Amino acid sequence: MKNFSITIHAIDEVLSAADENIDVQIDLLDGRKFTATFFSLRNLKYLLEKFRTTGECAKGTYVWAADMIVVESIDEETIHKTVASLIETGEIEFACTELKSSDRDD
């Protein structure tokens, strides 16, 4: 039995599961809600290269994001598998931000 659901917040349609980042809301059965941004490895490389050109992040020296979770691919199966593991290990409370009732997408 699945003890959570996810909502993927995409601005546009995901163009490439191998080269994306996407915001995800995680709703647990106990009523708690969490949020995180999932980044593919290829997307991190793309961002570093882009920042070298734009000058952001010390000209591509680093990439950071609050609640960053890095995965091989941004697809629903990978996201579900990752979230299930984070819940099972209790790491969800450290890897994601818990949404307060005023922040929730109810």
Image: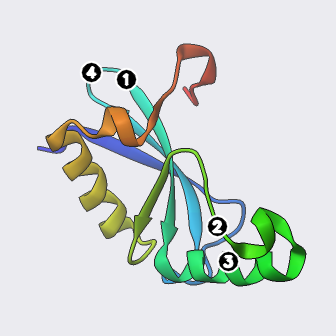
Which quarter of the picture shows residue 12?
bottom right
- Please say if the residues under marks 4 and 1 sit with CB atoms less than 8 Å apart: yes
Residue at 57% over, 26% down: 104
Q: Amino acid at mark 1?
A: Arg
Q: From the viewer's perspective, is 62 left or right of 6? A: right
Question: Residue beneath label 2, please?
Answer: 62
Q: Tag 3 or tag 1, which sits nearer the N-term?
A: 1
CB atoms of marks 2 and 1 within 8 Å: no
The residue that mark 4 highlights is 30
- Dot 3: element: helix
- Judge depth for marks 1 and 3 and give the one in front: 3
Mark 1 → mark 3, Cα distance in angstroms: 34 Å
**Pointers 4 and 2 in contact (C-beta within 8 Å):** no
CA gap between label 4 and label 1 equals 6 Å
Q: Mark 4 belongs to which amino acid?
A: Asp
In whole angstroms, how far apart are the C-alphas of marks 2 and 1? 32 Å
* Mark 4 secondary-structure assignment: loop
Q: Which residue is mark 3?
A: 48
Name which of mark 4 and mark 3 comes first in the sequence: 4
Disc 2: CA contacts within 10 A as few (<14), some (14-19) or many (>=20): few
Q: Dot 2 lies on which element? A: loop
Residue at which label 1 appears: 32
Marks 1 & 3, CB-CB < 8 Å contact = no
Q: In the rendered structure, are the residues bearing label 2 and label 3 in contact, judged by CB atoms less than 8 Å apart?
A: yes
Q: Amino acid at mark 2?
A: Tyr
Local crowd at mark 3 within 10 Å, few (<14), some, or many (≥20)?
A: many
Q: What percent of the width, then of the height, locates residue 22?
A: 57, 60
**For the N terminus, which image quadrant?**
top left
Measured from the top left, where is residue 49 in percent x and y?
71, 84
Picture disc at residue 12? none
